Image (cartoon, helix red, strand yellow):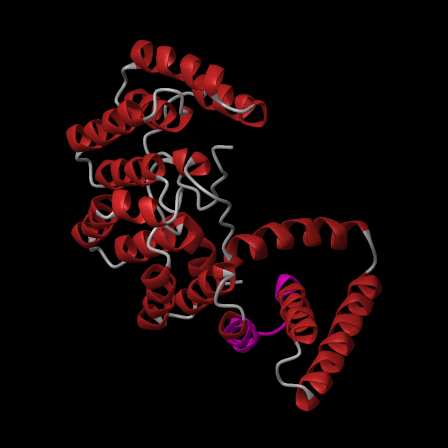
Amino acid sequence: MSQPRKRWIVNVVLVLAVLAFVGVSIVPIIAAFNQTQSSTQKSINATSGSASSDQRSKLEDAARGYEQVLQRESENQTALRGLLETRLQLLSLGVGDIKAVIEPLEKLAKLNPEQTRYAVLLAQAKQQIGDKEGAAQAYRSVLENKPGDLEALQGMVALLLTQKRPEAAVGLLQDTLNTASQANKIQAGSVDVVAVQVLLGNVHASQKRYAQALAAYDQAMKNDQQDFRPLLAKAMLLKEQGKTEEAKILFTKAASLAPTQYRDEINKRANESPAPSPTPTIQSTPKQ
């Protein structure tokens, strides 16, 4: 995979690694590629080249099999999912092009409008091939029906930031917050207000508007004093500003409130030396 595409995962999102704790799981296709490539490379180094060739041959045979099924049954979802997975595995081996996953994703998104994951993955794939308008349309298709969908929100915000449109990202998140109360009356929990506020703070932080970022985190803390996410977000920002003692208090409190599976990561963040430029991440996990 080309270096620009490898850098995409770094440049596509926000500055703070706190996104790892904002909302629901979101692992873009590019991240899956990179992770699989890493494990695949280790495997290749430990085995013969013929084994890798055999794996490629089996995957290509499987892909052709799924394609034959789809020629007869174009909406066979088992075959569509199998073809998508197989092509992703081939991409992880450096075979094929990312465009190959777009067609099955488009069909799966159309056949499963309630499963927004497909539309989000489609948007991410389109963004990676440079179709930013297509990516935006895919994100909007989700947000029109589910304005609080965190995967789509995070993806759309990331896209706007790569387009150097931070004010549009702020506007999107503020609009989501403005309509959250009504949306949650219609469907309880459809908008995770705290997560959106933290995301808003992260956008401000990415633009070095630290006062606005801290205000967003503080508002999120007021909304839910038992939620570890705004505490963690604020702690990381304070740490980057060199306010280590203030940050330490917040890290400790965040760790005490967080689910057990996140505490080691929080403690790791707390003990890391401040970096000149924090490394962003595109993966996020739920509050739970």
The tally of labels here is: 0
Q: Is residue 52 left or right of residue 249?
A: right
Q: Front-most of 158 and 37?
A: 158
Residue 264 position (above or below residue 131)? above
Residue furthest bottom as drawn: 72
Query: Which quadrant would the N terminus be assigned to in this image?
Result: bottom right
State yes or no: residue 152 in magenta: no
Query: Residue 244: horizontal and vertical position, in percent?
Result: 32, 13
Q: Is residue 286 left or right of residue 41?
A: left
Residue at 40% from the left image edge and 48% from the top image edge: 150
Q: Quadrant of residue 212?
A: top left
Residue at 69% from the left image edge and 71% from the top image edge: 78
Query: Residue 76: horizontal and vertical position, in percent?
Result: 66, 78
Query: Residue 266: horizontal and vertical position, in percent?
Result: 48, 23
Q: Quadrant of residue 250?
A: top left
Residue at 63% from the left image edge and 50% from the top image edge: 38
Q: Is residue 211 left or right of residue 54?
A: left
Residue furthest front as drawn: 186
Residue 10 position (above or below residue 76)? above
Residue 164 position (above or below residue 53)? above
Q: Quadrant of residue 97?
A: bottom right
Query: Residue 259: horizontal and vertical position, in percent?
Result: 54, 24
Query: Taken as a whole, is the magenta stretch helix, strand or loop?
Result: helix
Q: Which residues are magenta?
A: 91-108
Q: Is residue 180 left or right of residue 66?
A: left
Residue at 32% from the left image edge and 45% from the top image edge: 185
State yes or no: residue 98 in magenta: yes
